[in-house]
Image (tube, rainbow, N blue to C red):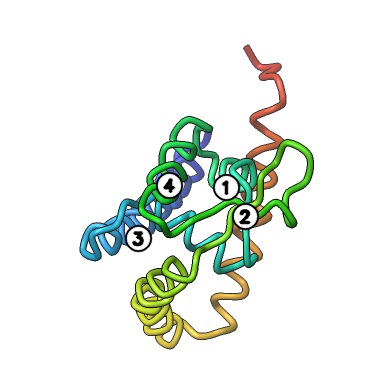
């Protein structure tokens, strides 16, 4: 691979890792695990979620997500909703206590994201999102391809 291109990939990967690190630091500063934050984030986005949805969205191991879900159920903030469940996939929803907990917690996260968005601007965020979604798709396809050069 050409050095210039490799350098760009290094910078992209560093930016992605650092961005994830900021979310990890936020989670730590708010006394919540990064993975619990992802579950809450997903439920906020869709109203409910399944374990598979979380695993697929964030490429997390099933065992990791199962552990987080079990903890959240034990803490009384998450329950299974049979009405929203399909087949073996159990829909997870927040309890009233979980909704209060999530709202308070994610409000702080939203404020951080809003401050960043204000500085970056809506147009750049839109372009960045489109490019990252496209890059993610192409990268996943490249992962599936065999390397014919070997």
Residue 24 on image: x %, y %: 31, 55
Q: Are marks 2 and 1 in contact (CB under 8 Å)?
A: yes
Q: Which mark is residue 54?
A: 1
**Where is 20 relative to 107, above or below?**
above
**SS for dot 2:** strand
**Which residue is denoted by mark 3 in the rendering?**
23
Query: For this rendering, which residue is in front, 29 or 88?
Result: 88
**Which residue is denoted by mark 2 in the rendering?**
49
**SS for dot 1:** helix
Residue ranking furthest to the top: 150
**SS for dot 4:** helix
- Residue 21 placement, left or right of 123: left
Q: CA distance from mark 3 to mark 1?
A: 17 Å
Q: Residue shown at 54%/46% (left/top)?
A: 58
Q: CA distance from mark 1 to mark 4?
A: 22 Å
Q: Residue shown at 50%/63% (left/top)?
A: 41
Q: Residue shown at 38%/45% (left/top)?
A: 71
**Where is 72 relative to 121, above or below?**
above
Q: CA distance from mark 4 to mark 2?
A: 28 Å
Badge 2 local density, few (<14 within 10 Å), some, or many (20+)?
many
- Residue 147 placement, left or right of 39: right
């Amino acid at each position: 691979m050409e050095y210039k291109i490799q350098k760009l990939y290094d910078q992209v990967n560093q930016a992605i890792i650092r961005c994830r690190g900021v979310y990890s630091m936020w989670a730590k500063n708010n006394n919540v695990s990064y993975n619990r934050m992802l579950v809450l984030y997903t439920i906020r986005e869709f109203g409910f979620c399944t374990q598979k949805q979380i695993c697929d969205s964030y490429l997390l191991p099933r065992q990791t997500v199962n552990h987080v879900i079990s903890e959240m159920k034990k803490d009384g903030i998450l329950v299974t909703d049979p009405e929203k469940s399909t087949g073996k996939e159990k829909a997870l929803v927040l309890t009233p206590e979980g909704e209060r907990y999530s709202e308070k917690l994610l409000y702080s996260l939203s404020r951080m994201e809003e401050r960043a968005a204000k500085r970056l601007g809506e147009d750049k965020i839109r372009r960045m999102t489109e490019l990252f979604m496209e890059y993610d798709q192409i990268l996943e396809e490249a992962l599936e391809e065999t390397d014919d050069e070997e």
